[in-house]
Structure formats: C-alpha cells, structure tokens
Amino acid sequence: MELRVRSGAVDLAGTLWLPASPGPHPAVLMVGGSGPTDRDNDVYFPPIRARLLERGIAVASFDKRGVGESTGDWYDGGPAELTADALAEAAALRDHAGIDAERVGLFGHSQGGWVVLEAAAADRRTAFVITNSGPGVTPAVQERFSVATRMRRAGRSERDVEGALGRFDAMVDRIRSGASLEAVADLASDEDLSTLTLVPTSADVLRLMRPWIDHDPRSALERIRAPMLAIFGSVDPVVPVEDSLAVMRTARAGRPGGLTEFIIEGGDHRSFVGDPPTVPDRYHQALGDWILAQGPTVIVDPA
C-alpha cells in the first residue's frame, strides 16, 4: 500500500506492508542509512521486512527526500530534517486503520540509527526504538574508527594508519571551522580516506556533512522513554561497537524502557554472516521476539 507524507516543504513517498493476518497490527517504521537510500535501503530491508510480516508485524519505509518518488534533495538531509521526516512518517503510520497506533515503533539502520533516536526522544508516542548498527558516538568518531579499522584489516602499517588519521582529523577540523570546499579538497581526495561513507569532494556533500559531523546521540538516548534495542555485528568495520554500547549503557541506565543488547557474533555492518553473507535466522527470530515482547533484556547470540 502506497503512502504519501508531507514533511515541511517535501513530499515523502513510501509503502506500507501489512501481514496476511487480521489487524490491527503492531508496526515498524524502517529508516535507512546514509546516502541516497530508497525505501528498500537498496537490497537490505526486504528480507528483514518479510520475516517481520510473517510474525504479524506491519512494516513501512520511505524513499529518502530527493530519492525515488520523494521530492526535495537528499543533500539537505541533516539530523533535524531527517528527524522531522521520520516523525511525519510515524504519525501517518499511526493513522492507518490497519495499525495499532499504540504499538508503532522505529527501526533505524546505520545513519538511520541516529535519526530514530532523535525521533523517539521527540515523540512520546513511540512504542519502541531499534538501532541496527546505529552508532552511539558522533559521525566524526565513527568515521575515524572506520578509517583505522579498514586500513588495519587490509594489513597497512601503524605508521600508515596514524598518518591517515592525522589527515582525517585535519579534514574534520576544517569542516568544523566552516572552511570552503577548496580548503578541504586536498584532504578529501586522500586515497586512504576514500573508504568513508561521505567524503567532501563536492559542495553538496560538504553542505550535508557540516550539521552531521559532531551530531551526538547522547542527549536523545537519555530522553527516550520507550524500550530500546541495539543490534550490532561483532566485527562491524564501520561502527565502534564497544564504544557505542558504553555510551548507550550509561545514557540508558535507570531510564524508562531500558536497553536491550543483541550482538551478532561474526556479523558485519549489516549483521551479515557466512558465505554468501546473509542476515542469519537468529537475527530475525530475536528481532521479531523483542518487538512482540517489548521488554528490556540482553539477548544472547547462540552462535
């Protein structure tokens, strides 16, 4: 079922998938990662969505602003804009006749993890919130980790790693200072920084990075009153898992809803394991179980 939502000056296009069983259903709004992501988050969301539908859980997701059938420009998608979009999408989901308005929650992958934390903190109607490889640190800290981890796993020397991190720090400092594209161009074109999700090699990307670079999720984590689930792959090369969990544990300690942790042993940034890489059955089982239970606990990965 197609959905259309107005968020400020943009029109957002999405789809609502309903289970075959009679409703009203609990529902999940899935928010994708960084870049020009569509409602399927390329090929990542459909398998997860299918398993949720089998459990009687409705799912909705949208093309990011400026992507697919949504209007606007994805380069204008800073934290405030994407949070507003998620809030508008969740409100539309609650209004649907087939949905249990009291059981609508948020699922955010990667960058979407930051977004759903902000949305859940802003809207007390959020029934639950799930961050799927969503960092508990700022984008600057997360991307710095990504550079170092990927270089080390590629067998680069510590001297090479430290040099690249120095160039990364200089690039971030220039972005923070409001420097022009020309002032960051030499660092942005560095070969060792090319693995970053977003590199300011154009004015559009630089514009997008400025509001994101020091976005800190701690305040949102402290304000959320809904149950929260954090899912990570244990060998994620993009997100510092232990550092993220340390922040989340501290921020959520004693808060309503608590924190559930689920670490997929051997999982990457998408919790893929095996050959060919795929989301394991235990991920789907735990995700569906937790949504239906909405209770804080620690899920033990049996792998």
Image: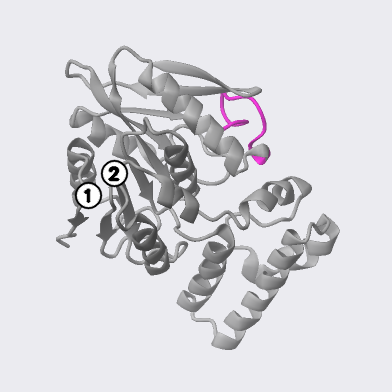
Which residue is most to the front?
A: 254
- Residue 17 on the magenta segment: no
Q: Which residues are magenta?
A: 64-75
- Give the residue at mark 1: 296
Residue 277 visible within the image: no
Which residue is most to the left?
A: 302
Residue 296: % across, % down: 22, 49
- Give the residue at mark 2: 227
Q: Residues within 10 Å of mark 1 (few under 14, many from 20)?
A: some
Q: Is residue 116 left or right of residue 276?
A: right
Q: Amino acid at mark 1?
A: Pro
Q: Quadrant of residue 274?
A: bottom left
- Please report contact status of discs 1 and 2: CB closer than 8 Å, yes or no: yes
Q: Quadrant of residue 153?
A: bottom left
Dominant secondary structure of the residues highlighted in magenta in the image: loop
Q: Amino acid at mark 2?
A: Pro
Q: Quadrant of the N terminus?
A: top left
